Amino acid sequence: GAVVSQHPSRVICKSGTSVKIECRSLDFQATTMFWYRQFPKQSLMLMATSNEGSKATYEQGVEKDKFLINHASLTLSTLTVTSAHPEDSSFYICSAGRGGPSSYNEQFFGPGTRLTVL
Amino acid sequence: AQSVTQLDSQVPVFEEAPVELRCNYSSSVSVYLFWYVQYPNQGLQLLLKYLSGSTLVKGINGFEAEFNKSQTSFHLRKPSVHISDTAEYFCAVISMDSNYQLIWGAGTKLIIKP
């Protein structure tokens, strides 16, 4: 149980286009979803936390207008990279949690999406 | 601020040899501790976790870790590694200090030599 999927697994796009990444919890309801970015040979950087039906909470330094997060249902969250540029190329990983944001919340991770912006 | 330190960025070890990957954290309150593994070009998989109870935690793939509160450590061990254990290993911590967010270590790359 507790499977999280991401789609697409890889995407290559031209500079200036927008890319949408989907994160789904397949066999549980995710009250909270997290979006991470991972640079090569580095650890994960939390970008934002989203709760179903409310606005995402972005970490300091993350542009909310550039990285649009929607958590429309208890099983789906999307990250849209708007007007992507080469510096946005990265590995994006989502995770989903069953608990609330202010309590222990084990996160189940998706397989990641490799974004390459040409 | 809470932090997680993985002192070794890379650990090379011969196949079938034992290995220990070190993790230290800074927190003055109760913590939950995790080890995740990331195989090349993949997401993260939970190896094991410590929430409470016995300080020796056994996980998947033959890994185990010991929570040492006095030394604020949670080192990961395996008595005999296999070539398939080649991966990046991340230690992470959750506590009230971090507002229940996962705080990540920088990762340790385990390199298995044949």
Image (cartoon, rainbow, N blue to C red):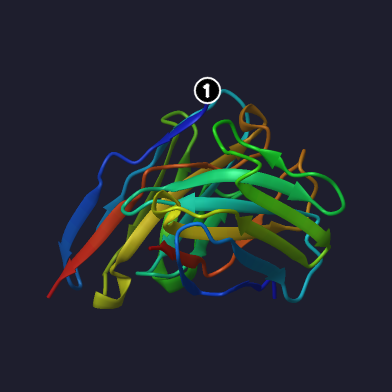
Q: Is B113 placed left or right of A114 in the picture?
A: left
Q: Is A27 placed left or right of B46 in the picture?
A: right
Which corner quadrant of the image does residue A81 belong to?
bottom right
Q: Residue at x 40, y 49 (%)?
A: A87
Q: Judge whether residue B100 can be spotted in this image.
A: yes
Determine the secondary structure under disc 1: loop
Q: Is residue A71 above or below residue B53?
A: below
Which corner quadrant of the image does residue A21 belong to?
bottom right
Which quadrant holds the C terminus of chain A?
Answer: bottom left
Q: Is residue B48 above or below residue B67?
A: below
Which quadrant holds the N terminus of chain A?
Answer: bottom right
**Residue in front for this viewpoint, A13 or A90:** A13
Q: Is B106 placed left or right of A76 in the picture?
A: left
Other-residue count near label 1 (Cα within 10 Å), few / some / many at <14 / 14–19 / ≥20: few
Hey, what amino acid is under mark 1? Answer: Ala
**Residue in front for this viewpoint, B80 or A94:** A94
**Residue in front for this viewpoint, B40 or B6:** B40
> How far across and how far down the image is residue A102, in percent?
77, 38
